[in-house]
Amino acid sequence: MTNYDNIFDQPEEKVEWVSFKTVGDKISGTYVDLTEDIDGFGNPQLVVTLLRDGVKYKYGVRHTHTWLTDQVKRCRLGQIIGFVFAEEKPSGKGQPTKIIQLKQNPTFVDEGWTKTWVESQAKMGIPADIALRPSILTGVTAAPVTPVAVPVTAPAAATPVAAAAPVVETVAPAPVANPVFDTIRNLAVSKNLVTASATPAETDAKIKEVTGLDLTEANTTQIIVTLSSIAV
């Protein structure tokens, strides 16, 4: 018999917001989540969540601080990263500007947390490369994946062109460089849709043939779900 009341016996999650007040203040921990929020002044911000000694520490980085948000977006979940209040600089607006630095090294990884996280996401059909990127950057959330039947449509017959008609040669645009796209292409290889020697353009064409979708930012979630459901 299922005891539904066990859910109420779970320990309460400890969460603290980080605010730097003095030069030299710092916080570090395992990078476990990245979300978006609005701060108390109405400014959109990224919220970085660090796990340390069982406590989740949240630190907000305004979207306008692009030098810092760009660095955060390049980090992978499971890395051990830190923020430090490095110095203050005059701003010309009365209050000095706080200079916050991100400290990270791709080789500094919380192996235990990463292993547990990747295994839990694999059960939902999410590849490791996607699982270790925050969902707000990939559009993929940690949700159960339902196998999807993929219809394969035969190509339409070519329409003859009159001999006198001019022939216009078109060149397909080069595939867009995007780490999420590269991960999807690798997923296509792992599903034996193409070989490892296939060009990005060939792989993208095969992905469209199988899923019916162009490889674009808007379609990444559905493409991953569809490809992940293919049995090898």
Image (cartoon, rainbow, N blue to C red):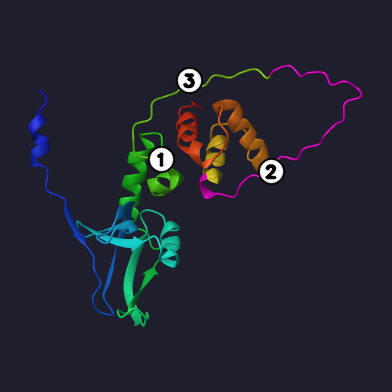
Q: Residue furthest right?
A: 164
Q: Position of residue 130 (x, y in %)?
A: 44, 44
Say above or below: 192 vs 9: above
The residue at 39%/47% (across/down) is 136
Q: Closest to the observer: 123 or 181?
A: 181
Q: Position of residue 176 (x, y in %)?
A: 61, 47
**Residue 193 in view of the camera:** no
Residue type, mark 2 in image: Pro
Q: Which residue is mark 1?
A: 140
Q: Which residue is mark 2?
A: 173
Q: Position of residue 13 (x, y in %)?
A: 16, 50
> Helix, strand, or loop for circle 1?
loop
| The N terminus lies in quadrant | top left
Can residue 166 be found in the magenta stretch? yes
Q: Closest to the observer: 144 or 73?
A: 73
Residue type, mark 3 in image: Ala
Q: Which residues are magenta?
A: 156-180
**Residue 140 in view of the camera:** yes
Q: Which residue is mark 3?
A: 149
Which sits earlier in the primary sequence, circle 1 or circle 2? 1
Which sits earlier in the primary sequence, circle 2 or circle 3? 3
Can residue 131 be found in the magenta stretch? no
Q: Nearer the viewer, mark 1 or mark 2?
A: 2
The CA distance from mark 1 to mark 2 is: 26 Å
The residue at 48%/20% (across/down) is 149
Q: Residues within 10 Å of mark 1 (few under 14, many from 20)?
A: some
Main SS of residues in magenta: loop
> Helix, strand, or loop for circle 2?
loop
